[in-house]
Image (cartoon, grey):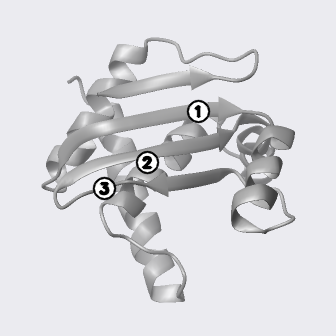
């Protein structure tokens, strides 16, 4: 089950479309949907999680807690809408596109993709681009 939770004045338009898209990502990678929770929040909310749970005193756009078991993908994905908006401005892209990138990024981590090395980051970006295109395909 995929659920969307909001800790700020923001909601996704047409949650069903996002759910179908995330399901398509999982299927395309050969995984099964478990319990996936997206929590949309502010910079301050996510900063506190970063400090309290990861001991990082920095702002970030996404933090994910992975509960995947085998091929069943489960986890909590926290996304700072403030950061996504700022990233979109800095990168010169639409907010909606940057949001898709960050949302797919969390799922791709659960599927085993990393982004620590330059090669891993290049593969992650390529996979994000591939999965963003799936959103624009009628499910």
Residue 71 in percent (x, y) is at: 16, 57
Residue 15, compared with residue 131, is above or below; it is: above
Residue placed at 55% from the left, 18% from the top? 12
Dot 1 lies on which element? strand
Number of on-image labels? 3
- Left or right of 33? Residue 82 is right
Label 1, label 3: how far apart the Cα atoms are: 17 Å
CB under 8 Å between discs 1 and 3: no
Which residue is identified by label 3? 68
Label 2, label 3: how far apart the Cα atoms are: 16 Å
Quadrant of residue 57 within the rendered picture = bottom right
Dot 2 lies on which element? helix
Q: Earlier in the sequence, mark 2 or mark 3?
A: 3
Residue placed at 35% from the left, 33% from the top? 135
Number of the label disc, if any, that sits on residue 39:
1
Residue 87 in percent (x, y) is at: 75, 50
Residue 6 in percent (x, y) is at: 64, 21
Label 1, label 2: how far apart the Cα atoms are: 14 Å
The residue closer to the viewer here, 55 or 119, is: 55
The crowd level at tag 3 (other Cα within 10 Å; few <14, some 14-19, many 20+) is some
Q: Nearer the viewer, mark 1 or mark 2?
A: 1
Quarter of the image for the C terminus: give it: top left
Dot 3 lies on which element? loop
Which residue is identified by label 2? 104
Residue 50 in percent (x, y) is at: 75, 57
Quadrant of residue 58 within the rendered picture = bottom right
Q: Nearer the viewer, mark 1 or mark 3?
A: 3
The residue closer to the viewer here, 126 or 105, is: 105
CB under 8 Å between discs 1 and 2: no
Residue 87, compared with residue 138, is above or below; it is: below
């Amino acid at each position: 089950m995929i659920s969307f939770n909001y800790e700020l004045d923001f909601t996704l338009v047409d949650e069903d479309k996002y759910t179908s898209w995330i399901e398509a990502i999982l299927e395309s990678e050969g995984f099964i949907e478990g319990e996936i929770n997206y929590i949309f929040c502010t910079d301050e909310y996510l900063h506190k999680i970063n400090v309290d749970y990861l001991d990082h005193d920095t702002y970030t756009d996404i933090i994910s807690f992975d509960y995947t078991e085998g091929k069943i993908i489960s986890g909590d994905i926290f996304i700072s809408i403030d950061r996504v908006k700022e990233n979109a401005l800095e990168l010169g892209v639409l907010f909606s596109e940057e949001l898709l990138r960050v949302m797919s990024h969390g799922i791709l981590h659960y599927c085993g993709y990393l982004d620590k090395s330059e090669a891993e980051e290049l593969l992650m970006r390529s996979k994000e681009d591939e999965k963003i295109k799936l959103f624009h395909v009628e499910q």
